[in-house]
Image (cartoon, rainbow, N blue to C red):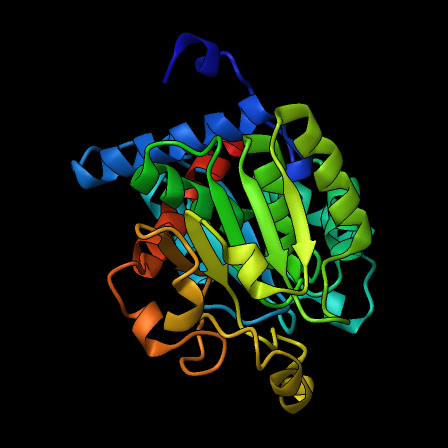
Amino acid sequence: MTTTQTKINLRGRDFIALADYTTEEIQYLLDYAIELKRKQKAGETYQPLKGKTLGMIFEKSSTRTRVSFEVGMYQLGGHALFLSKNDLQLGRGETVWDTAQTMSRYLDGIMIRTYAHRTVIDLARGATIPVINGLTDMNHPCQALADYQTVLEKKGKLQGLKLAYIGDGNNMAHSLMLGASKLGVNIAVASPEGYTPDEGIVKQSKEQAGAFGSDVLVTQDPKEAIADADVVYTDVWASMGFESEQQHREMAFRHFQVNEELTRYAKPDYLFLHCLPAHRGEEVSEGVIDGKHSVIFDQAENRLHAQKAIMAALMG
């Protein structure tokens, strides 16, 4: 890392949304993640969190989030404590404030994966230790950081690239937009009517993008969004908590599948990303997700390295 980057101090901060971080701070975390990945691949021991404990609250189930945070803490020399909603008094009516105050006396950091974004904000207000947003219905910043790490590694840069997101204007779309607007990435989001991104997030992203000379486009035309894209991204049509809408969403999104026909409009060397889990044959064709442009498992791996950077920077 450069001298300027090493001067950045994030110790004690929360990680709730990429909008809370400056361009320099996000770039620092990306560089740190890449360096931690290099160390891990080289077999170098690096344990800045030795003796520290991360409490992991899960109100939503998980594969990548749980494994990557737990393994990441172990590799950094610390310990991760898994806490389901049934393990805590939160499930029996204890306030978020009381939970945050109590856990702050035991732990060095909290990661929470939940439904309402308000829960994470309230937890962070009550806690005296860093709180990391492992996912809410509004934001998924850890995933977006890993995504931009993947693009940076594969393309060698971020500024000036175009990312096309095709699908539900959900937490993933929000975090990608907020990150793009801080990193100089042009982003185009195509969603059907009724499923477009939050208007406040769109406005915030456009305002931030203007300062960095990048563009934010929200459209209902997948071809317009994907035109000349360097990166193509999609997510499931019915995210966790919206399974009851599956059939209705299949009808609404039927023209938004990322397939061989649609990706012809992207650049010939485009990257395909998906935050997983994926439903092949629904939001993406097998030919695309399992094809030569797909980097979904490099992307999934980078959850480990990006989150190690976040934890080490905030808790180290």
Res 218 → quadrant? bottom right
Vertical relation: 8 (above or below) 231: above
For the residue pair 218 and 91, the one nearer the viewer reads as: 218
For the residue pair 210 and 301, the one nearer the viewer reads as: 210
Q: How many marks?
A: 0
Specify the farthest residue to the left: 42
The image shows residue 91 at horizontal and vertical percentages of 74, 71
Specify the farthest residue to the bottom: 247
Q: Residue visible at 54% across and 32% down? A: 183
The image shows residue 147 at horizontal and vertical percentages of 45, 48
Q: Residue visible at 49% across and 38% down? A: 311
The image shows residue 180 at horizontal and vertical percentages of 57, 39
Q: Quadrant of the N terminus?
A: top left
- Note whether residue 134 is visible: no
In the image, 67: left or right of 106? left
Vertical relation: 162 (above or below) 213: below
For the residue pair 113 and 86, the one nearer the viewer reads as: 113
In the image, 64: left or right of 121? left
For the residue pair 247 and 239, the one nearer the viewer reads as: 247
Q: Residue visible at 75% across and 48% down? A: 201
The image shows residue 296 at horizontal and vertical percentages of 35, 60
- Note whether residue 137 is visible: yes
In the image, 260: left or right of 194? left
Specify the farthest residue to the top: 3
Vertical relation: 74 (above or below) 212: below
Res 78 → quadrant? top left
Q: Residue visible at 30% across and 74% down? A: 287
Res 117 → quadrant? bottom right
